Amino acid sequence: MFSKLQCYFFTDPSDRSWSKRKSMTPPPIMSELRIILLGKSLSQTRSVGNFILGRSAFETEDPPRSVELHCESDRGHVEGRYITIINTPQLYDPKLSQEELNQRIKECISLSEPGPHAFLLVVQPHDFTHKDRNLLRYILNSFSDQAINYSAVINTDCGFYKSADEGRNTAIHKLTEECHGRLHSFPQLHEWSKDSVCQLFEKIDQMVKDNGGGYLVHESVEDAEQSFKPDGAQRYLDN
């Protein structure tokens, strides 16, 4: 039996604009945030985790290919909040069998209990293709069909967005639209910025508010495994 994240707070599907979804009332400040990082580059996702926590919590050197990767988490107190970062280096692999992916997602779910407040999709636009975007969406849907509503794009290459036209027809732009326009940039991961981290927290607070004030929670679903097809990952990659 596979535990799949379920959402009990729903947004208006017709409202796709992040800016429009902001209300005049400031969102409540969450005293604790559980954040799952997803991305193609192991070193970049770990660097983002370190940046948020303000310390070297994760090793940023790429491990040998022979080393089996697992979910990893760390916790810290940042700007008055308790932050749990869950990194998922073992998920972004199109060669995983469905059974392997299910098992690794269960591992991630256990580290984020009772449920994540946010999925941060770490991308480098110069090296992000439509296949990369499709694989990220597949992994998100493996957590929950509502996970995209709890997701934001993290751009670690700010130069790419120096003009609006430059990113208009790219996979990263489409992914950002699917995340209701939620985008945050960390242009200098080697130098911690209180302002940048606090701005990210404010965006997550707003996202949580837009989702009804809660987080994704999971429950055991008998037919959950039926939602995963043996060729699921390849089907997403082929789209």
Image (cartoon, helix red, strand yellow):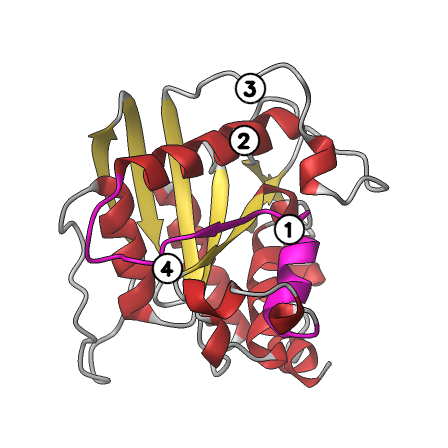
Where, by quadrant of the figure, is residue 158 drawn? bottom left
Badge nearest the viewer, 2 or 3: 3
Say which residue appears at 70% left-offset and 60% top-offset: 227
| Separation of marks 3 and 1 at Cα, in angstroms | 18 Å
Dot 4 lies on which element?
A: loop
Q: Amino acid at mark 1?
A: Cys
**First to last magenta residue range:** 169-193
In the picture, measured across the screen, residue 60 lies left or right of residue 130, that is left
Q: Nearer the viewer, residue 26 or 211?
A: 26
Dot 1 lies on which element?
A: loop
Give the residue number, with chain letter if any, for mark 3. 27
Discs 2, 3 touching: Cβ within 8 Å: no
- Total numbered circles: 4
Give the residue number, with chain letter if any, for mark 1. 179
Give the residue number, with chain letter if any, for mark 4. 88
| Separation of marks 4 and 2 at Cα, in angstroms | 19 Å
Q: Could you say where residue 224 lies in the image, as x and y percent from the top left?
A: 65, 53
Badge nearest the viewer, 1 or 2: 1
Discs 4, 2 touching: Cβ within 8 Å: no
Q: Residues within 10 Å of mark 3 (few under 14, many from 20)?
A: some
| Separation of marks 2 and 3 at Cα, in angstroms | 14 Å
User: Does any portion of residue 4 appear in the rendered image?
Assistant: no
Q: Amino acid at mark 2?
A: Tyr
Q: Earlier in the sequence, mark 1 or mark 2?
A: 1
Q: Amino acid at mark 3?
A: Pro
Give the residue number, with chain letter if any, for mark 2. 215
Dot 3 lies on which element?
A: loop
User: Does any portion of residue 232 appear in the rendered image?
Assistant: yes
Q: Residues within 10 Å of mark 1 (few under 14, many from 20)?
A: many
